[in-house]
Image (cartoon, rainbow, N blue to C red):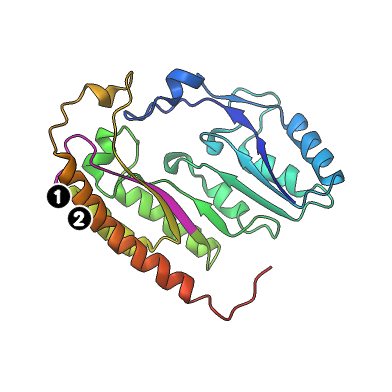
Amino acid sequence: ISTFVNIMEGCNNFCTYCIVPYTRGREKSRAAEDIVEEIRSLVAQGTKEVTLLGQNVNSYGKGLEPKIDFPDLLQMVADIVGLERIRFMTSHPKDLSEKLIEMMKHEKICPSFHLPVQSGSTAMLKAMNRKYTREEYLAKVKALREAVPGIALTTDIIIGFPGETMEDVEDTISLIKEVEYDAAFTFIYSPRVGTPAAKIKDDLPVEEKHRRFEAMLDVLNEIVIRKNADRLGQVFE
């Protein structure tokens, strides 16, 4: 049995395209003891795997007393007898710490990491208010792969953000080729009323957005299919 467990609500990041901070409010973490007790109860009922959920799990624990961070919480959850597997999402790249990367080596934590990039262009990342560069993102990817060889990496990608150029799209495609994601959630940008991005002039024709999206998707799908094919004949839990 696999179960989802919310560990926090809200978000403090204010990415220019995202409505979450305005609709769900600021980050608020649940007490670690409450989370652990909930998971213990689930395990008693037969749960073998939990996925810890938060808009940005890497921010877990801010404002809590006594002080605790997300890797500390993962250790507490991993100590629960009878729980076999732990997953989590989503991790904001700017807050991915060396401590969390080291924690990924734990035998109960599944070797899978969702690290939304949104764009491979530093210019677009700045426009989106993501607070990291292409180079900083790739450094996090390298550190994860060094810590956990064979780790599966998944992501989120947006095409057609206001002001995007073909060079920005090519940057995203080249990043996909470099990282070689195992899967991705992909989106054509659409404005959300109430966000800063909704106020930016968006004169890129819909047809062009779709053309760029398909070009990106062709590269991504080829990589995902090949990586899946490489697993044929292997046995997994």
Numbered disc 1: secondary structure: helix
Q: Can residue 61 be seen from the camera position used here? A: no
Q: List x then y, in percent, for residue 77.
A: 74, 44
Q: Amino acid at mark 1?
A: Met
Q: Which residue is mark 2?
A: 170
Left or right of residue 62, residue 4 in this image: right
Q: Which residue is mark 1?
A: 166
Q: Amino acid at mark 2?
A: Glu
Q: Is residue 154 magenta?
A: yes
Above or below for 87 versus 202 = below
Residue extent of the magenta highlight: 153-167
Q: Residue at x 30, y 46 (%)?
A: 119
**Mark 1 packing: few (<14 Cα in 10 Å), some, or many (20+)?**
few
Q: List x then y, in percent, for residue 62.
A: 58, 27
Above or below for 60 versus 215 = above
Q: Is residue 155 magenta?
A: yes
Q: Which mark is residue 119?
A: none
Above or below for 130 versus 9 = below
Above or below for 8 versus 46 = above
Residues at discs 2 and 1 in contact (Cβ within 8 Å): yes
Camera-nearest residue between 20 and 171:
20
Cα–Cα gap, marks 2 and 1: 6 Å
Question: Which quadrant holds the C terminus?
Answer: bottom right
Q: List x then y, in percent, for residue 14.
A: 38, 26
Numbered disc 2: secondary structure: helix
